[in-house]
Amino acid sequence: MFQIRHYIIGISLVLALMFQIMPMPPVVDPFRPDWVYLVIAYWTLALPNRVNVGVAFINGLLLDVLLGTTLGVHSLALCAVTYILAANYLRLRNYSVWQQAIIIGLLSALYHLIVFWLLRLLTDLNFNFEFLWPVITGMVFWPWIFLLLRKMRRQFRVS
């Protein structure tokens, strides 16, 4: 029998991938948060037995295909930050949402640093401070993402 609660994680990840590639005005586009990273971070903290490094790897590959970057760049970066989250999820759960936002921001900075290093190694990319705007917007959006996904998890009894 079809139960939506079995598909909530997949639906949220598909929506995050759609938000990641959704066209935006050029003025706002540099501020786009990393939706896939934020959703994976939430599910890793909430249900580390269901969303882990493997899910991050697959979504990273999908993100590479959708964004047209070198295959494996976002996968490696997502796997690295997801591993850190999964290894420390018990400790991070005890922090308030605002403290988690700071940690999510630091890990987002690490994510962008890994992506930049790999793209610099593979292409001729120069550093631009616009690469770090998603770190700030990710920190700002984290409390709302956290509350929305927690409400969905509780309402549909996802476990």
Image (spheres, rainbow, N blue to C red):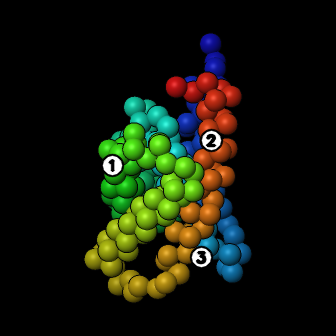
N-term-proximal mark, 3 vs 1: 3
Q: CA distance from mark 1 to mark 2?
A: 20 Å
Q: For the point 65% across and 45% down, which residue is it?
A: 147
How far from the left and from the top, in percent, is residue 87?
A: 32, 44
For the residue pair 26 and 87, the one nearer the viewer reads as: 87
Specify whether residue 14 is in view: no
The kind of residue on which mark 2 rests is Leu
For the residue pair 139 and 119, the one nearer the viewer reads as: 139
Disc 2 target residue = 149
Disc 1 target residue = 83
> What secondary structure is found at the residue carrying circle 3?
helix
Q: For the point 39% across and 48% down, which residue is it?
A: 85
N-term-proximal mark, 3 vs 2: 3
Q: Which mark is residue 60?
A: none
Residue 44, quarter of the rendered image: top left
Disc 3 target residue = 30
